Amino acid sequence: MSVEIALLTIFILSIFVGFEVVSKVSTILHTPLMSGANAIHGVILVGAIIVTGHADNNLELGLGLVAVVLATINMVGGFVVTDRMLELFKSKKSSKTGEKK
């Protein structure tokens, strides 16, 4: 029983530490950190595919499929958000004069 309590305590503390770390990131560093996180999610997706390929029963196959789907959604969503953020930094051309604003 004490092992479960210790693991639960570590999990709860990691939530608080993660929240504090993420909330302290400046807006200038957010886009590079998102790109790095997308690369990590790509590795997670590859790992989920490999683990699912070695599934021995239907439960493992189902959990692996869920892991692949969630990792894919997470990675694609991260790239979409990063792309939208990078669009904010591009200069827009005026439709009347053809000059940059």
Image: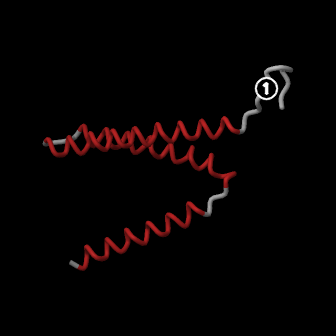
SS type, badge 1: loop
Q: Determine the residue located farthest toward the left in the rendered image.
A: 57
Percent position of residue 81, x then y: 55, 40
Q: Tell me the residue at 47%/46% (across/down).
A: 40
101 and 7: which is toward the camera: 101
Task: Say which amino acid is labelled 1.
Answer: Lys
Residue 8, compared with residue 91, is above or below; it is below
Q: Position of residue 1 (x, y in %)?
A: 20, 78
Residue at position x 65%, y 38% in the image: 86
From the top left corner, tell me how far across and down residue 88 is, in percent: 69, 38
Q: Quadrant of residue 83?
A: top right
Residue placed furthest toward the front: 96
Figure check: 9 above or below 75: below
Q: How many marks?
A: 1
Left or right: residue 7 compared with residue 33: left
Q: Position of residue 90 (x, y in %)?
A: 73, 34
53 sits left or right of 92 in the view: left
- Badge 1: how crowded within 10 Å, few (<14), some, or many (20+)? few
